[in-house]
Image: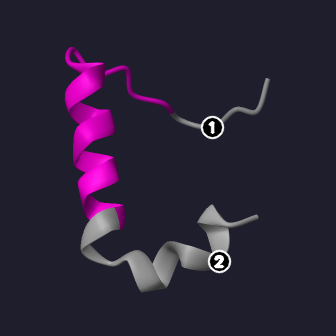
């Protein structure tokens, strides 16, 4: 166990789409993380 707080959303697919959208909005910021 990590003892990290978590939240299980009622619409997980919506969360994935929103997260992907945020990455695409600022791709240069996340480029290093995405290419490793």
Q: Residue at x 32, y 78 (%)?
A: 26
| Percent coordinates x, y for residue 30 in the rendering | 51, 74
Q: Earlier in the sequence, mark 1 or mark 2?
A: 1
- Tell me if 13 is positioned left or right of 3 in this view: left
The residue identified by callout 1 is: 4
Q: Is residue 28 above or below residue 6?
A: below
Query: In which quadrant of the rendered view does residue 25 lie?
Result: bottom left
- C-alpha span from label 1 to label 2: 25 Å
Foreground residue among 6 and 36: 36
| Percent coordinates x, y for residue 20 in the rendering | 33, 50
| Percent coordinates x, y for residue 35 in the rendering | 68, 67
The residue identified by callout 2 is: 32
Is residue 7 found inside the magenta-colored segment of the image? yes
Q: Residues within 10 Å of mark 2 (few under 14, many from 20)?
A: few
Q: Which image quarter holds the N terminus? A: top right
Query: In which quadrant of the rendered view does residue 15 lie?
Result: top left
Q: Which image quarter holds the C terminus? A: bottom right
Res 14 label:
none
Q: Residue at x 20, y 18 (%)?
A: 11
Q: Residue at x 55, y 76 (%)?
A: 31
- Tell me if 32 is positioned left or right of 7 in this view: right
Is residue 30 found inside the magenta-colored segment of the image? no
Foreground residue among 5 and 36: 36
At numbered mark 2, what does the secondary structure look like: helix, strand or loop? helix
| Percent coordinates x, y for residue 2 in the rendering | 76, 33
Q: Nearer the viewer, mark 1 or mark 2?
A: 2
Q: Is residue 23 above or below residue 28?
A: above
The kind of secondary structure the magenta stretch mainly shows is helix
Q: Is residue 26 above or below residue 20?
A: below
Q: What segment is highlighted magenta in the picture?
A: 6-23
State the colouring used for the structure image. one colour
At numbered mark 1, what does the secondary structure look like: helix, strand or loop? loop
């Amino acid at each position: 166990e990590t003892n990290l707080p978590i939240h299980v959303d009622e619409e997980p697919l919506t969360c994935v789409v929103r997260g992907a959208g945020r990455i695409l909005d600022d791709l240069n910021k996340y480029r290093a993380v995405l290419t490793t």
